[in-house]
Amino acid sequence: MFCVKILTAYPEMFPGVLGYSVIGKALKENVWSLEIINLHDFGFDKRKSIDDSPFGGGPGMIIRPDVVEKAVNHIKENSSRNSLYIYMTPSGKTLKQLDLVKYSKFEEIIILCGRFEGVDQRAINILGFREISIGDYVLSGGEVAAQVLVEGCIRLIPGVLGQSESILEESFSEELLEYPQYTRPQVWKDTHRKEHHVPDILLSGNHEKIKRWRFNKSIEKTENNKPDLLIKNRNKK
């Protein structure tokens, strides 16, 4: 079973989106497990405080390294799995689909959610956390980012999604964005009564032509939305 353990100052934020749809269904069916560890259970004083002011001055508070270490030791005492340690932070390496593929192969991932002005860097370095970001922007904490990463991993577990082919064809699997998708009605009239038709090629029944059309549309979409993917792909070749 794929195990996920979250270190957070706000345990009530979980399971959040992870409790819904196919991810939530897989959780209920014990395809994967989720354990939430409250950092305040390892606080350093009677008030169960977990943070302190930064050395060198500056705004905000920093989560202390001794608090994080106690929480990690608690996990290690109760687990012997092959574990991956991740710290969600805007200053980390940007998460990619290939990263999710690698992470999903671990037996267990432990995710530390940053809060306030972050976590003492010594805890990150000494305890072996990988610093990971979900994008070039700042959130109030790492809990939402952790849910993004976990969902990305869980959906890759065999049997979670209905069709394994859908994983192979979606965006980033081949370093191209996914082609446009269409469904019924074949002719859609919007609120202004203007007609919008499904591309004729998708109704042709010619699977080879449809495959070629989808590939060309993937390239077109990638060029428009994420041209850096095409550049990186060309450089590899």
Image: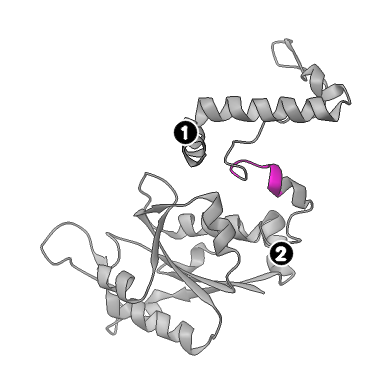
Q: Give the residue pinned by disc 2.
A: 26
In the depicted view, which residue is nearer to us: 94 or 75?
94
Which amino acid is tagged 2? Ala
Specify the quadrant that holds the N terminus: bottom right
Residue occupying the far right of the picture:
205
The mark lying in front, picked from 1 and 2, is 1
Name the residue located 51 percent from the left edge and 33 percent from the top edge.
Answer: 230
Q: Which mark is residue 231?
A: 1
Q: Is residue 41 left or right of residue 28?
A: left
Residue 165 inside the magenta-drawn segment = no
User: At label 1, which amino acid type do we have?
Assistant: Ile
On the image, the x and y values in percent for residue 50 come to 30, 74
Magenta-highlighted residues: 167-172
Location of residue 233 with respect to 128 vertically, above or below? above
Q: Nearer the viewer, residue 69 or 214?
A: 214
- Quadrant housing residue 52: bottom left
Q: Is residue 156 above or below residue 216?
A: below
Circles 1, 2 touching at the beta carbon (< 8 Å): no
User: In the rendered image, which quarter is residue 176 located in?
Assistant: top right
Instruction: Estimate the x, y position of residue 40 in percent, counting from the top left.
Output: 38, 76
Q: How is the image coloured?
A: one colour
